[in-house]
Image (cartoon, grey):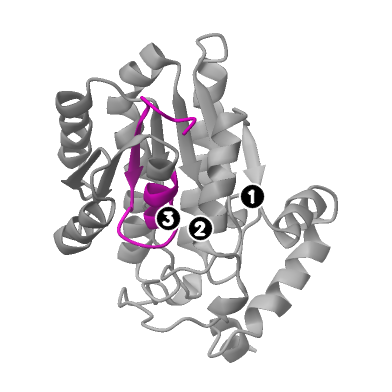
C-alpha cells in the first residue's frame, strides 16, 4: 500500500494498459481517477474497484475542455494530484502514400495533444505535490516503424514534449517518465486505423505471446516509485532503441522484414 494517500489520473482507462493500471494503482492504495470515452466501461471498472476511492470522468482527450474538466473534477473530489498517466492512445496500419491525412491528424490529436492537454492543466498540482507525469509512448517513438507513420510521428512528438518538460523542471522536483512498453496484449491493434480511417477490426499478431497488460502496469508502478526518467520494456524493445543509434539502416531493414510478415501487411502487398 505504498501509494496510500496519493491520487492518480489514468487516461484510456477502459481497456488494456490503462485498465490494468487502474487496478494495480488502486491495489497499491491510490485513489484513482479513471478517464475514457466509454461511460459503460468506466462504470463497470468503478464497480469492480468496489469501496476503494475511485472517480470516473468521461473524457475525450482530443477535446481540450474535456481534459480541463478531468483535472477540475479530480481536484473537486480529492484536492490533489500526485500521478498523471497519459495512456490514451490510438494506432494505425497503412502506407503513408495510401493514407488519408485525416488519419494522421486523428493520431496526433489522441496521442500527442491528449498528453499535452492533460499535462497542461494538471501541471500546477503536480508541481505542488512533486508528483509524476507519465507518458505511455512506444518503441515507435524512438525508431520509426513502417506502415505506422502517424503513430510513430505522434509518439516521437510525445517523447520530445516529455523530454523538454523534464528539463524545464529539473530543479522543481517534478518527475517525468517516458514509458515504452513494447508489444503488449491489448485491443490497440484491433482499434488501429487503416488508410481510410476505418478500424482494422482484427489483430495481425498473436496477442497471447505478448507481455500481459498487468505486467506492464506493475513495471510502470515500479518505475514511478523509483522515479525513473525512461523505462523501455522487452528485450526486443531495448535492442531496437540501442541498435538504431548506431546501425540505423540495418535496423530499418530488419523492421521492414518483421512488419512485412504480419498477415495482410501493407508492406507485403507493396512487395
Label 2: state its secondary structure.
helix
Which quarter of the figure is the C terminus placed in?
bottom right
**Mark 1 packing: few (<14 Cα in 10 Å), some, or many (20+)?**
many
C-alpha span from label 3 to label 2:
5 Å
> What is the number of the mark on residue 188?
none
As displayed, is residue 168 above or below residue 106? above
Image coords of residue 107 (percent x, y): 37, 57
> What is the number of the mark on residue 142?
1
Marks 3 and 1: which is nearer the front? 3
Label 1: state its secondary structure.
loop
Determine the residue positioned at 21% across, 61% down: 44
Image coords of residue 31 (percent x, y): 31, 35
As displayed, is residue 155 above or below residue 251? above
- Look at the image and say whether residue 17 sits in the magenta stretch: yes
As displayed, is residue 39 above or below residue 10? below
Lower position in the chain sequence, tag 3 or tag 2: 3
**Which range is magenta?**
1-24
Lower position in the chain sequence, tag 3 or tag 1: 3
Q: Which residue is mark 2?
A: 214
Q: Which residue is mark 3?
A: 20
Amino acid at each position: 500500500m505504498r501509494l496510500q494517500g496519493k491520487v492518480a489520473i489514468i487516461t484510456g482507462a477502459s481497456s488494456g494498459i490503462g485498465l490494468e493500471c487502474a487496478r494495480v494503482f488502486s491495489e497499491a492504495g491510490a485513489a484513482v481517477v479513471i478517464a475514457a470515452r466509454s461511460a459503460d466501461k468506466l462504470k463497470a471498472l468503478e464497480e469492480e474497484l468496489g469501496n476503494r476511492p475511485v472517480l470516473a470522468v468521461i473524457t475525450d482527450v482530443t477535446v481540450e475542455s474535456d481534459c480541463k474538466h478531468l483535472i477540475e473534477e479530480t481536484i473537486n473530489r480529492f484536492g490533489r494530484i500526485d500521478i498523471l498517466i497519459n495512456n490514451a492512445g490510438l494506432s494505425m496500419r497503412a502506407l503513408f502514400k495510401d493514407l488519408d491525412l485525416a488519419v494522421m491528424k486523428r493520431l496526433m490529436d489522441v496521442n500527442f495533444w491528449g498528453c499535452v492537454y492533460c499535462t497542461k492543466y494538471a501541471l500546477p498540482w503536480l508541481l505542488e505535490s512533486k508528483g509524476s507525469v507519465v507518458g505511455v509512448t512506444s518503441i515507435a517513438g524512438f525508431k520509426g516503424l513502417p506502415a505506422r507513420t502517424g503513430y510513430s510521428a505522434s509518439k516521437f512528438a510525445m517523447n520530445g514534449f516529455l523530454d523538454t518538460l523534464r528539463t524545464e523542471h529539473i530543479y522543481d522536483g517534478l518527475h517525468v517518465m517516458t514509458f515504452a512498453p513494447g508489444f503488449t496484449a491489448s485491443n490497440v491493434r484491433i482499434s488501429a486505423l487503416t488508410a481510410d480511417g476505418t478500424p482494422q477490426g482484427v489483430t495481425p499478431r498473436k496477442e497471447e505471446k505478448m507481455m500481459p497488460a498487468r505486467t506492464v502496469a506493475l513495471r510502470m508502478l515500479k518505475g514511478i516509485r523509483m522515479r525513473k526518467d525512461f523505462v523501455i520494456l522487452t528485450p526486443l524493445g531495448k535492442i531496437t532503441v540501442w541498435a538504431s543509434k548506431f546501425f540505423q539502416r540495418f535496423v530499418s531493414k530488419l523492421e521492414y522484414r518483421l512488419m512485412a510478415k504480419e498477415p495482410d501487411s501493407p508492406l507485403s502487398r507493396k512487395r
